[in-house]
């Protein structure tokens, strides 16, 4: 069937890649390899440092929280994973303006998905662990904050990396992951000695904030879309402030509900209130934006509804 429908696959071509094209491919492969090494060094050293400096028992307690966040990341990655394969073709066929509009829409959805999940995790993780395993397995609120901050930043950066890959921006800033990994290891050892588990975890965020959070958007806008990155940063900071405002409201309600301890009843009520408040605030802040209207129309076409 393949030979019949696609006879061109059996055609031998004498054309060869030019030296310039071969050099570009070699540079991209090298950049991807270095990026992968940097990502592994960044994401895989925290547990080693915690066990070496603080104690291996903390790894077991922390793994309960990581299990939950990793499951949520697995679900949310279905969104970015579903669009990754089609992005390269989209950018090849569409105009730069259409490509940038798609980037804004996907970035908007992804940041709010991770934002709402982060609000829920900060609010509900410790009460859930209390009901599931008991209070002896709890981490303090500062460590939980650090876990969730890393969850949010890593998930958000995955989206930016997806667009960098689709735009073929492999070589720009190829050294960046190595710098981030080096900063993270040094900071983790120093702050881990001073602040314990919180110091190690917050070092990962500081490392990404020092390089990735501002550098990747700059590369995408400068080399991918030939646009100023300033409006993007303004929009993103506004969104972060909105998420923080929602979080303050939800945590205030949490303190009122759980002041006498955690039970299945008040945990279920807190879960419902967290979801309703987050979604309502999301609608309040965004219902007039083009990205929201696009997502609304997309969901309307996908979900079954009465005619």
Image (cartoon, rainbow, N blue to C red):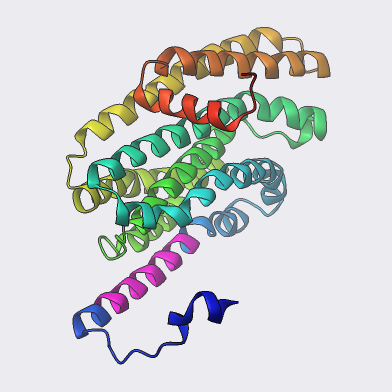
The magenta region covers 24-40
User: Within the image, what quadrant is residue 205 found in?
Assistant: top left
Q: Is residue 63 magenta?
A: no
- Quarter of the image where the N terminus is located: bottom right
Q: Does residue 75 sit above or below 28 in this rendering?
A: above
How far from the left and from the top, in percent, is residue 284? 45, 12
Q: Is residue 32 magenta?
A: yes
Report the front residue among 144 and 194: 144
- Residue furthest to the front in view is 4
Residue at 47% x, 63% y: name it.
41
User: Within the image, what quadrant is residue 273 found in?
Assistant: top right
- Quarter of the image where the C terminus is located: top right
Residue at 27% x, 88% y: name it.
16
Task: Give left or right: position of 55 versus 88.
Answer: right
Q: Is residue 118 visible?
A: no
Task: Give left or right: position of 53 versus 294.
Answer: right
Report the front residue among 84 and 1: 1
Q: Is residue 301 visible?
A: yes
Q: Does residue 196 sit above or below 87 in this rendering?
A: above
Task: Give left or right: position of 10 versus 303.
Answer: left
How far from the left and from the top, in percent, is residue 202? 47, 42
How far from the left and from the top, in percent, is residue 299? 54, 29
Report the front residue among 256 and 305: 305
Residue at 59% x, 34% y: name it.
144
How far from the left and from the top, in percent, is residue 29? 36, 74
- Residue furthest to the top in view is 256
Q: How many marks?
A: 0
Report the front residue among 250 and 297: 297
Residue at 57% x, 31% y: name it.
117
The chief SS type of the magenta part is helix
Task: Give left or right: position of 210 versus 109.
Answer: left
């Amino acid at each position: 069937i393949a030979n019949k429908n696609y006879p061109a696959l059996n055609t031998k071509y004498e054309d060869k890649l030019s030296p310039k094209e071969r050099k570009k491919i070699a540079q991209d492969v090298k950049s991807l390899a270095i990026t992968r090494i940097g990502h592994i060094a960044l994401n895989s050293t925290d547990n080693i440092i915690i066990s070496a400096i603080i104690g291996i028992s903390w790894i077991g307690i922390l793994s309960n929280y990581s299990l939950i966040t990793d499951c949520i990341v697995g679900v949310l990655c279905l969104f970015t994973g579903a669009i990754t394969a089609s992005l390269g073709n989209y950018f090849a066929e569409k105009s730069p303006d259409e490509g940038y509009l798609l980037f804004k829409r996907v970035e908007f959805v992804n940041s709010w998905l991770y934002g709402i999940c982060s609000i829920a995790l900060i609010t509900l993780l410790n009460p859930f662990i209390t009901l599931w395993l008991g209070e002896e397995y709890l981490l303090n609120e500062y460590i939980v904050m650090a876990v969730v901050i890393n969850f949010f930043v890593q998930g958000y950066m995955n989206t930016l990396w997806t667009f960098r890959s689709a735009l073929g921006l492999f070589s720009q800033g190829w050294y960046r992951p190595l710098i981030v990994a080096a900063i993270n290891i040094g900071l983790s050892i120093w702050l881990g000695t001073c602040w314990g588990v919180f110091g190690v975890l917050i070092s990962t965020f500081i490392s990404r904030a020092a390089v990735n959070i501002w550098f990747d958007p700059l590369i995408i806008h400068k080399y991918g879309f030939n646009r100023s990155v300033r409006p993007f940063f303004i929009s993103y900071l506004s969104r972060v402030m909105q998420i923080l405002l929602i979080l303050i409201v939800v945590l205030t309600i949490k303190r009122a509900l759980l002041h006498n301890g955690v039970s299945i009843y008040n945990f279920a009520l807190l879960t419902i209130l967290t979801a309703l408040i987050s979604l309502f605030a999301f609608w309040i802040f965004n219902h007039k934006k083009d990205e929201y209207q696009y997502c609304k129309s997309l969901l309307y076409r996908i979900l079954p509804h009465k005619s």
